[in-house]
Image (spheres, rainbow, N blue to C red):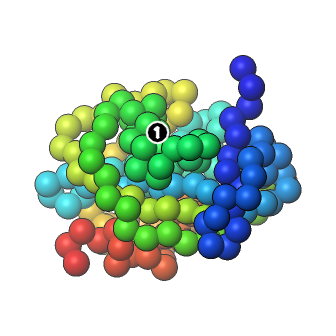
């Protein structure tokens, strides 16, 4: 099986090439990504805990799912695909905003991503893929915000950035 390719982009999200995912993370090159936030009817956010064997951020809590778009795939198609692969369900998604972030990790890799934030709704229990996800839970946004403040080491870098800078885009009560 060949390594997954990521879409290299410029600062305006224009595609400028493809590269194997690990190489892009080793070289810290800007590439397209997405983060999905799923809420229930009680306006609680579905969080996932990343699997223990993930190459970065293992066992950390984060948004419902995230990954990289494939060449020729729209942001919404990618979000639905990965939601099915990681959490075992699909629902309608709405793209809310996008931003660029850069986060180096202790293992020498760097996430440098043009991250598209999508929101959707779901009320059932997910069927998690244990290769990708260690655990999941529902939390209201105020509790998440407080827990990130008190225990930042328990959360992924991109999730903390999104919560700090883009809270108004993911807060479905606003």
Taking the spot 20% from the left edge, 37% from the top edge, the residue there is: 124
Q: Position of residue 40 (x, y in %)?
A: 20, 52
140 or 117, nearer to the observer: 117
Q: Position of residue 52 (x, y in %)?
A: 61, 36
Is residue 5 positioned above or below 99 on the image?
above
Quadrant where the C terminus is found in the figure? bottom left
Residue on which disc 1 sits:
82
Is residue 100 positioned above or below 140 on the image?
below
Taking the spot 51% from the left edge, 55% from the top edge, the residue there is: 34
Q: Position of residue 161 (x, y in %)?
A: 54, 71
Mark 1 packing: few (<14 Cα in 10 Å), some, or many (20+)? many
Residue 172 in view, yes or no: yes
109 or 57, nearer to the observer: 109
Number of numbered discs on residues:
1
Residue 112 in view, yes or no: no
Q: Is residue 164 left or right of residue 88?
A: right
Q: Is residue 35 left or right of residue 96?
A: right
Q: Is residue 40 left or right of residue 49?
A: left
Q: Position of residue 169 (x, y in %)?
A: 35, 73
Quadrant where the N terminus is found in the figure? top right
Residue extending furthest toward the top: 1
Could you say whether the residue bearing mark 1 is in a helix, strand or loop?
helix
Taking the spot 15% from the left edge, 58% from the top edge, the residue there is: 42
Instruction: Find residue 173 and report its image quarter.
Output: bottom left
Taking the spot 68% from the left edge, 46% from the top edge, the residue there is: 6
74 or 31, nearer to the observer: 74
Instruction: Find residue 142 and report its image quarter.
Output: bottom left
Is residue 99 positioned above or below 6 on the image?
below
């Amino acid at each position: 099986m060949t390594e997954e390719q990521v879409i290299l982009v410029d600062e305006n999200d224009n595609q400028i090439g493809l590269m194997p995912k690990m190489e892009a993370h080793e070289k810290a090159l800007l590439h397209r990504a997405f983060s999905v936030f799923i809420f229930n009817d009680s306006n609680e956010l579905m969080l996932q805990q990343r699997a223990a064997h993930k190459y970065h951020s293992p066992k950390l809590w984060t948004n419902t799912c995230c990954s990289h778009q494939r060449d020729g795939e729209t942001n919404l198609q990618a979000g639905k695909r990965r939601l099915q692969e990681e959490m075992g369900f699909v629902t309608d998604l709405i793209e809310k905003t996008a931003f660029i972030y850069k986060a180096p990790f202790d293992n020498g890799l760097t996430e440098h991503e043009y991250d598209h934030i999508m929101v959707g709704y779901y009320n059932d229990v997910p069927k998690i893929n244990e290769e990708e996800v260690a655990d999941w839970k529902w939390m209201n946004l105020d509790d998440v915000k407080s827990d990130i403040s008190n225990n930042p080491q328990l959360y992924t870098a991109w999730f903390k950035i999104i919560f700090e800078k883009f809270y108004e885009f993911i807060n479905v009560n606003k």
